[in-house]
Image: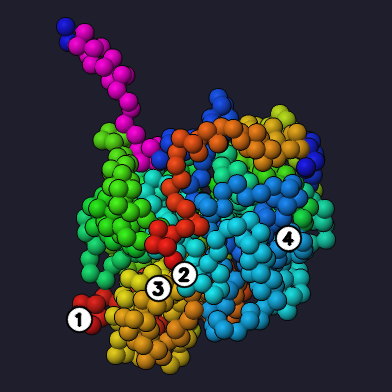
């Protein structure tokens, strides 16, 4: 069971590009494991390290003053592309607890919500205000509160966001969906009685 | 009087069931429960599993002491990290080998049928599903892979899921889902010779961008879609996710039924007749409305090539690289400038004639027999440019055998291309098939993201025809002159 997601305050790590895809978040060569170990090391690996594996100085994750920041301020359509949940795992492993963006790709959003990583979809104007605030003061902070579904911007303005109500409750309780799904066992069995299986993967019709 | 009549007419309408889309029909019949305000518990008819996104899900089951609820609705294959070289040798990469072995153990433990490395039906999960007849109209199909959208070509609702959801489906055969919105992609007219399904989807992405379909399911409609073969429809549905839509669908028709009939897992005899009667009820009702729509004119399309680092950055092959200074807003300008810097392309530069290092013909987008026939049609009796490495990677062992039986493999070999074993290969460069830093590839795959085909590699997405023509020329080339000559 995960920790319940309580309100938190953090400075921001700005990554302003739109359409950051999951191949950038965690390149495929880091997907060969059979557990979740070491994924934080692969986070944004091709932007973070040069061909010799040395950190690229200019990249935001490598800047010393960015250490420990728990909120990623990203561009639109963050997490597009591959369904790899490794992207959410890697962001969590690195220490992020929320990503703020104007739009999230559907599969990434689902994956994030299942891993205690809050995808906060901000209205365009609030996102622009926040980006400007961070540019003016790189140490500007936000407070993210899932309970009230609000982000408090550096100027003190509070902006609302929406998370799927069911996912929100799971995060607040620190539980996950599987228990809820398992509680529908009888309904699933009734469904299966009324709807014969469409295929039997164990037995091809042609017998070989 | 008139007013009264109108009231009566609208009252009568209320009693009739509202017209429904294909998506609504498939969705409605899979809802196990939908408590007010909560997501639906959606039943999954077929769960496809591969080595990369499943191990942590099986570990999750073990941690909770759970079993796989329906191994008989689950099928696994090894495709992403498997080498496409000699299959009689062990996998050299320790991690990849461990991952494939873990899949084998998990499948054995839970009784899940597996088309592993030595199976005659091993292949890319989205190639073997339709090919074996497991993919059927009206089904719900999921897989821990975003290109699961491919199976929507059969009129199934098929979408990619994360590993937590893979665990949910393994344990319960259900998923929690909110009903997606609908987005009609209507393709009017007829494709010209040398213009293919791949060009349709790349043109759509260039038109609407890579985020437009978020929250939606595409339904591809119109005469140009009706005229396509099943494999061509798969190419289009496959890249729905590149437009942000988790799924893409085509209403089943005689093309679908003819494709499905007689395949290994397809129903037979009386079961077939019953299934067919049901499948004919699936297409959307007249008057069913979509939340959004867009129309393309197939007759105006040219072969498409991407120039940038997302699949929406595409151009007609005769086009020139766009200028960031002309981009709509600062964000678009920055994105385009960054993409061109990565690709080392200059604004105004033509794509035609641009030298390439590698040509990759394969992936779940374009590795089926009809794709290979198209490529072979151009390569027959010709040689690939000596400066270009050309990989032809069939989508499955079944496709491979078919291509060998038809003499296509010999055409590729004689032309100087590598004829390889089935797998995802250079589409995502997990298995050792990859671009070197700075190399350019024309690729029939689905993603031109930075580093997708190898760190520092640069990808031009295109159709199998364009890829074959480019292999011969050693540079980006238009296949149409070759196609028109009747080759």
| Magenta residues, dominant SS class | helix
Read off the residue under disc 4: A35
The CA span between labels 4 and 2 is: 28 Å
Answer whether labels 4 and 2 touch (C-beta < 8 Å).
Answer: no
Q: Position of residue B382 (x, y in %)?
A: 31, 90
Which image quadrant for residue B240? bottom left
SS state under label 1: loop
Residue drawn at x 23%, y 16% as measured from the top left: B9
Locate the C terminus of chain B and report the quarter of the image it occupies.
bottom left
Label 3 element class: helix
CA distance for labels 1 and 3: 27 Å
Q: Taking B472 as reference, is B456 above or below it?
A: above
Same subunit, tags 3 and 2? yes
Span shown in magenta: B4-25
Q: Residues within 10 Å of mark 3 (few under 14, many from 20)?
A: many
Query: Residue B399 has which mark?
Result: 3
């Amino acid at each position: 069971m995960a920790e319940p997601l309580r309100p938190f305050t953090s400075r921001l790590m700005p990554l302003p590009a739109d359409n950051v895809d999951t191949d950038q978040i965690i390149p495929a060569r880091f997907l060969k494991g059979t557990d979740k170990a070491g994924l934080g090391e692969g986070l944004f690996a091709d932007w973070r390290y040069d061909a010799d594996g040395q950190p690229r100085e200019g990249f935001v994750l490598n800047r010393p003053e960015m250490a420990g920041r728990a909120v990623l301020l990203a561009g639109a359509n963050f997490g597009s592309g591959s369904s790899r949940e490794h992207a959410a795992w890697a962001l969590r492993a690195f220490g992020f607890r929320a990503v703020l963006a104007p739009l999230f790709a559907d599969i990434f959003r689902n994956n994030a919500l299942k891993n205690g990583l809050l995808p906060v979809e901000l209205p365009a104007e609030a996102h622009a205000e926040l980006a400007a605030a961070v540019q003016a003061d790189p140490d500007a902070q936000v407070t993210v509160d899932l309970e009230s579904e609000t982000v408090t911007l550096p100027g003190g303005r509070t902006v609302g966001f929406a998370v799927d109500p069911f996912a929100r409750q799971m995060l607040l309780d620190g539980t996950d969906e599987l228990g809820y799904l398992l509680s529908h066992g009888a309904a699933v069995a009734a469904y299966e009685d009324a709807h014969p299986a469409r295929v039997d993967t164990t037995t091809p019709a042609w017998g070989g | 009087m008139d007013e009264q009549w109108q009231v009566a007419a609208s009252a009568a309408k209320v009693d009739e069931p509202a017209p429904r889309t294909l998506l609504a029909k498939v969705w409605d019949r899979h809802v196990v429960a939908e408590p007010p305000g909560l997501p639906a518990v959606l039943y999954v008819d077929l769960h496809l599993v591969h080595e990369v996104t499943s191990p942590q899900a099986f570990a999750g089951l073990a941690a909770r002491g759970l079993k796989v609820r329906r191994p008989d609705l689950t099928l696994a294959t090894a495709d992403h990290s498997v080498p496409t070289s000699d299959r009689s040798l062990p996998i050299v990469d320790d991690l990849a080998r461990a991952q494939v072995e873990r899949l084998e153990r998990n499948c054995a433990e839970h009784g899940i049928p597996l088309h592993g490395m030595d199976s005659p039906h091993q292949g890319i999960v989205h190639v073997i599903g339709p090919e074996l007849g497991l993919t059927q109209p009206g089904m719900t199909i999921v897989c821990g892979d975003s290109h699961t959208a491919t199976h929507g070509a059969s009129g199934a609702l098929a979408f990619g899921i994360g590993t937590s959801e893979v665990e949910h489906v393994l344990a319960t055969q259900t998923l929690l889902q909110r009903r997606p919105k609908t987005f009609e992609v209507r393709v009017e007219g007829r494709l010209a010779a040398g213009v293919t399904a791949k060009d349709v989807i790349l043109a759509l992405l260039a038109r609407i961008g890579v985020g437009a379909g978020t929250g939606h399911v595409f339904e591809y409609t119109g005469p140009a879609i009706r005229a396509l073969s099943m494999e061509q429809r798969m190419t289009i549905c496959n890249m729905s996710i590149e437009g942000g839509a988790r799924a893409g669908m085509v209403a089943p028709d005689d093309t679908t039924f003819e494709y499905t009939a007689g395949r290994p897992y397809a129903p037979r005899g009386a079961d077939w007749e019953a299934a067919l009667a049901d499948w004919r009820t699936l297409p959307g009702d007249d008057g069913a409305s979509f939340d959004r729509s867009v129309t393309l004119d197939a007759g105006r399309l040219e072969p498409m090539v991407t120039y940038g680092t997302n699949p929406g950055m595409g151009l007609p092959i005769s086009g020139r690289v766009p200028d960031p200074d002309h981009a709509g807003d600062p964000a678009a300008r920055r994105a385009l400038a960054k993409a061109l810097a990565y690709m080392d392309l200059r604004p105004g530069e033509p794509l035609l004639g641009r030298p390439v290092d590698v040509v990759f013909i394969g992936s779940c987008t374009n590795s089926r027999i009809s794709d290979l026939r198209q490529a072979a049609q151009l390569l027959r009796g010709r040689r690939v440019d000596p400066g270009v490495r050309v990989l032809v990677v069939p989508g499955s062992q079944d496709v491979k055998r078919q291509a060998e039986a038809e003499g296509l493999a010999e055409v590729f070999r004689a032309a100087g291309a590598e004829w390889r074993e089935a797998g995802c290969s250079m589409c995502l460069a997990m298995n050792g098939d990859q671009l070197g830093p700075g190399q350019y590839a024309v690729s029939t795959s689905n993603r031109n993201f930075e580093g997708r085909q190898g760190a520092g590699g640069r990808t031009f997405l295109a159709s199998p025809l364009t890829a074959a023509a480019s292999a011969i020329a050693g540079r980006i080339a238009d296949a149409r002159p070759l196609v028109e000559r009747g080759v």
